[in-house]
Image: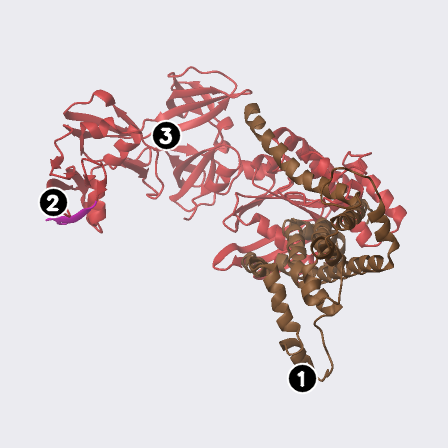
Chain colours: A brown, B red
Amino acid sequence: MKKFRQLVIPYVIWASLMLLLPMLLIFLYSLMKQGNTILPFKLTFHNYVRFFTDPDFLLILVRSLGIALKTTVICLLLGYPIAYFMANSKPKTGQKLVLLITLPMWINMLVRTYAWIGLLSNDGVIVGFLKLLGFKHVSILYSETAVLIGMVYNFLPFMILQIHTSLAKMDKSLLEAAADLGANKRESFLRIVLPLSISGVVSGITLVFLPAVSSFFIPKLLGGGQYFLIGNVIENQFITVGEWNFGSAISMIMAVIMMLSMYLVRKADRKSGKEEM
Amino acid sequence: MFMEEKRKIIQFKHIVKSFGDQVVLKGIDLDIYENEFVTLLGPSGCGKTTLLRILGGFIEATEGQVLLNGKDIKDLPPYKRELNTVFQKYALFPHMNVYDNIAFGLKIKKEAKDVIDQKVMKMLKLIGLEGYEKKDITLMSGGQQQRVAIARALVNEPKVLLLDEPLSALDARLRKEMQYELKRIQQEVGITFIFVTHDQEEALTMSDKIVILKDGEIQQVGTPEDIYNEPVNRYVANFIGESNIIPGVMLEDKKVRFDDEVFDCVDVGFKKNERVDVVIRPEDIEIVPKGRGLLNGTVESVLFKGVHYEIMVETTPGTTVTVNMHVRDKDANVVRGEDECISANDFYLDLEDMEGIDETEIIARADAQAWDPKTDEQLSIKDIETDLKQEVGEYSVTFKTGNGLSITRKIWVIDQHVVENKKANEAISAFNFFKTTDEIQESMALDTDLMVWANAQAWHLDNEDEPVELYVDYHFDQDKIREGVYRVTFSTAGREFKIHTTRFCEEGKEVGLTFEPDMIHVMEKMGF
């Protein structure tokens, strides 16, 4: 057994190097003035200062956090009832619903987002339908609404599956016990089901918020270059402008913000779990 | 002593429950009184948990009424019933500590904080877990969780507490401890407990009243003493405690005949010559010197059981039948072709078994096989020809493979040879058979194979569907068997009595057995 365990060591070293090295490089880039090599290394905070003193960048940051937050809240509000319904349906129906939810993931995310361009465009199905209803001057594509729709569509399955998992593994006899002790349906949902599914909600939030905040191709495709998010800024810095150092700095800032927000969510979860009813 | 008039708290009126085609409860009528410890006892699948869940409101009865304090509770959801349940796996809320679990029902009822505090503390004291209120429920032992589950139910001051096999998840020592604990708690709080279990010992220890269920029907209701001493039928006698159950005939009031002898008993009210089952508990039989008792027998085995010896005494020897086993050489039954081989045995067939015999059965009886000698691959037998008729006689049968390789064997149809033993109430039959040396040598379980080959069977005379266990005896060496005819004897154990006594007795000794007339319990025969 012991010998076997030692066999793993090279893999662990290799994997951690390959994971850590790029991150370390980005970290070092962000602390340099210019150039794509880290030698000779000259320490500077210029990139960070530039980001925090430019109101345009700060606006984009706030906007990105805002839309990610909106996406997460909508996903939660839509996802919880769906997950609850799935967990309470017959096992066979439940399995079919899980399949239905995961089905879109079999197709590339980018392709699906392109499909939304067609759906949301001014001569597309949705706008056409709205026009029939009497909304004459609607235009959805290339707006914040379009980006939001795209994000909710792409990230909703993650929320549903996480909550569904936590609901499905819950012991049904707990609900019988609650009913036995005098709790009606609403009370047993609030006091038993909801608290016990919080862990699923938290991982659902994590899985939606993180990719939403740094997403760049959804705003690029559905926002049409008019709706810039922080992910697009980073992409631009690396690919168009060629300012790797500034791009790295923004990435580092985003990483810190995400870590911070996750820490806060987990802390809230632990607190609500221990809180007295 | 002042006799208190007991009030009915729960009445089951002709409860029927079916799931699809399956009828789980077949019309249960049962009254449960105040302050009773009632046990619903039966094996799994007897409907006891279903009955409890109907009472708890988790499932609905197909037919019938449940009255709680005289009122029909059919339309009350579980949360409006003045009952509480202790679930089999406790169903404690994992996200709450001990205090919050116990306080759950009170908080739902919106009782004042200080009242809740007082009641929970009282409960913790009752279950002996003071100081544990802040403890995480998932970190507690099975026994502690069990106590919390009981407290969580009792704190609501229900009129009746339902317990669904609550001790089944505990180890033996803890289970015993909890039995006393539950009885103590029930006596202290003075409410009705309805306890579901399949464990007869639990039922006997704790109950005021035991309800024995089988296949959705009540077999007997009574105090533990009643049920132990006066079981109404063979099923109850077997389920509660150990017993000797002997088929007999009630000649007249207070006279019963079994094992060909007539005994005095105290039972009355049976029809003349009614067939009955007789129960004698092992501890009610006394061993006396030979000739001084009501029965004589030989000590077969003695087992030390701690407090007492368990002694088996055979009063009637078993029934035996001996058959001839014709052994042939390994190759005698094989016909070899170029790329295949076929083999089959002669066999005896009972005239009675002729009806409905088909080719599959003939292949099985003859043990006909075909195979490829190079690969040992089994080949199928395509064709069977036989002149078999439904008469006693000698016939032939030919088995053929797809390529036309064939083997011809004999079938003897004979009238069944049955040995009956009226005294022991059993019959036995077996047939002569043919085998080859290699078949015998290759047998993995020779005793069982011999029974199959000889088609040996034994049954009770009064109930042919009830098999009697058979033993095999033979005098040959399985590994070195040669051609020839060997005798194989099949026998039953005969009538044996199990006796619990503190006095040792030597194996093989001839002894007498005696018992008092009131130790003979006569029961109605069960209808099957």
Which residues, given as a range, are shown in magenta? Answer: B380-394
Q: How many marks?
A: 3
Residue A10 is situated, as x and y percent measured from the top left of the image, at 59, 30
Residue B60 appears in the picture as rendered: no
Q: Nearer the viewer, residue A138 or A91?
A: A138
Q: Same chain for marks 3 and 2?
A: yes
Q: Earlier in the sequence, mark 3 or mark 2?
A: 2
Callout 1 crowding tier (Cα within 10 Å): few <14, some 14–19, many ≥20: few
Kindly state the secondary structure of the residue where label 1 is placed: helix
Kindly state the secondary structure of the residue where label 2 is placed: strand
Residue B190 is situated, as x and y percent measured from the top left of the image, at 75, 43
Q: Which residue is mark 2?
A: B398
Q: Same chain for marks 3 and 1?
A: no
Callout 2 crowding tier (Cα within 10 Å): few <14, some 14–19, many ≥20: some
Q: Which residue is mark 3?
A: B495
Residue at (67% x, 65% y) in the render: A221
Q: Chain of mark 1?
A: A
A48 relative position to B330: left or right = right
> Quick check: A131 above or below A68?
below
Q: Chain of mark 3?
A: B
Residue at (73% x, 79% y) in the render: A138
Residue A198 is situated, as x and y percent measured from the top left of the image, at 73, 51
Residue A194 is situated, as x and y percent measured from the top left of the image, at 73, 54
Task: Tell me how far mark 3 sits from mark 1, CA to CA.
Answer: 93 Å
Q: Which residue is mark 1?
A: A132
Q: Same chain for marks 1 and 2?
A: no
Residue A137 sits in quarter: bottom right
* Three-letter code, disc 1: Leu
Furthest toward the right, the residue is B114
Residue at (44% x, 37% y) in the render: B278
Q: Nearer the viewer, mark 3 or mark 2?
A: 2
Q: Nearer the viewer, mark 1 or mark 2?
A: 1
